[in-house]
Amino acid sequence: MTAVRKTRGRTTWRTKLLLLLLAVSVPPLVVLTVWDYAALREAFHAATLKSLQGLARAKAEALEQLTQDRRTQVERIAGLLTPQLAAVAQEEAARNRRIVIGGGEAALPALEDAEGRDADGRAAADEPPAAAPDPLRSSPSEAMQDLTRVLALILWDQQQFEELLVIDPEGRVLASTYEGHEGRTARDLGYFQQGLKTTHFAPLFVSPITNRLTTVVSAPIRGPAGNTLGVLAARLNLSRFFRVVEDFTGLGKTGETVVAHRAGEELIVMAPSRHDPEAALSRKMPLDAAAGRPLREATRGQAGSGQLVDYRDRQVLAAWEGIPSLGWGLVVKIDRSEAMRPAILAGLRMLALTVPLLLVVVAASFIASRELVRPLHQLKVATEKISRGNFDVEIDIRSNDEIGELAASFDRMVAAIKFFRAHQRRPEEEEEFDEDTV
Amino acid sequence: MALYDDILAIARDYMGPAAEEYIQRRIRIVQKGEAPETITPDRLERLAAGIDMTAKVYMGPTRAAAFREEVLALEGRYPVEPGDD
């Protein structure tokens, strides 16, 4: 029992030395590796967010610029149409042809392509009434023909528009590059009403003509005296907008851009996204939803970035920006797993280096402890022999250090003891031996 | 006297407290009874041979050989003069 206790309680100097060497080498190595990896991840995280911020800013600026360009173009075209529309108005006045809109002697059908339609392109009203015969269309005047021709030329020249309409101040579509719209009324449409006052960018809707997402930019057509002669409405081809949104450069395989508009207590996605091509107008989320925070802030014009959970319940790194002229918010995001993959790979490489290094350190500690303790072990064995009366010991320690000095002292001590023992017992023999030998 | 001191200093490195007694015994033999302190360089070779033979009893052959070599090396510092022998 006692022997067992002794064995258990005994820690050899070699074990202590090994533990000491491991203690001073392994923890710093592990801590350094972990710290390096953490710093690497943090750097990647920050760099990714910075890169996303740059992308979000660039995309928001591009969309902002596109919006401004379209506004400017529509205003410029509205200015170009002043002479033609003035001539039509003059001619109409001369003919004294007055159309009563919304009832009376000649009620007009509502415009087919309007922002009041839902995402499926169905009309808000049941069925549009059949077009009534338009006296202007049935016998178009020279001024009207001129206006229609100019509109067609402009549309041909300006590829970014899908349709151009000229609407008189009472809401009647005087001319359109889509023939079916002429003679209809746009009196109740927001873009007409707003367009009478100023340049207006209507919310997105699905065009029943093209079955694509579109929007209308409207601007007043002013006469020479500043009076409003009518409204120019331009239905936009949004492909360039969507090209900006669907450009995945720098977004890897999981990155995407989401643009949304705030409508009441809801956020409505305004364009297709990578993971949801049908998202435009159909994906909606409550304003207070956690996943909607970046879009909510972006629609308020606030920029930001961070790590969050998106609408797919995925951890993402995201950056967001507002598009003030449209009242939209834009979020550029990438799955965290993909964004951080280089950091994880770098971490694995670090691990692949550290583990062998750790093994080398452990092996070196083991060898070092053995080599350092070897002379002490020799001395211990020799001392044990002497303590048991066996003076026939020889130690082979040649190190030029304290251990070497200790070994030399030990040798001196053994030599002296042997000498004294020999001469105490048989000095005469020694003398005789020496005499004989020498 | 200087030669004796140097021999004693070398012996202390190998024999510790027994050095003086040991070396006096060895020198007395090669001096044929004369005082050890009067040892002359011409006796070094015989002294070294004696050390080589007897020191092995008290230490390992390697150390004994080193002991002998150190004593012999004193011949360089104390050249044998004519008439010493």
Image: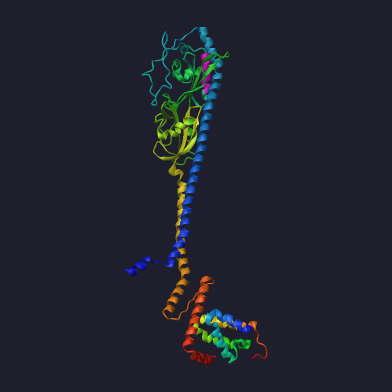
Residue A17 drawn in magenta: no
Query: Measured along the vertical axis of the image, is residue A388 above or below residue A200?
Result: below
Q: Nearer the viewer, residue A134 or A434?
A: A434
Q: Residue A45 or A23: which is nearer the viewer?
A: A23
- Number of numbered discs: 0
What percent of the width, then of the height, locates residue A24? 48, 59
Q: Residue at x 47, y 66 (%)?
A: A368
Give the x, y percent position of residue A272. Answer: 43, 32
Residue farthest to the left?
A1
In magenta, the rendered stretch is: A143-154
Is residue A360 in sight in this rendering?
Answer: no
The residue located at (51%, 76%) in the rendering is A409
Q: Residue at x 53, y 79 (%)?
A: B16
Protein image colouring:
rainbow
The percent coordinates of residue A274 (x first, y second) are 43, 36
Residue A256, x across and y down, in percent: 45, 37
- Looking at the image, the residue that sits furthest to the right is B82
Quarter in which the C terminus of chain A is drawn: bottom right
Q: Nearer the viewer, residue A203 or A380?
A: A380
> Is A145 within the magenta?
yes
Query: Does residue A164 lie above or below A314 as drawn?
Result: above
- Asked whether residue A388 appears in the rendered view, the answer is yes
Prevailing secondary structure class for the magenta stretch in the rendered image: helix
Q: Against A18, is A204 above or below?
A: above
Q: Quadrant of the N terminus of chain A?
A: bottom left
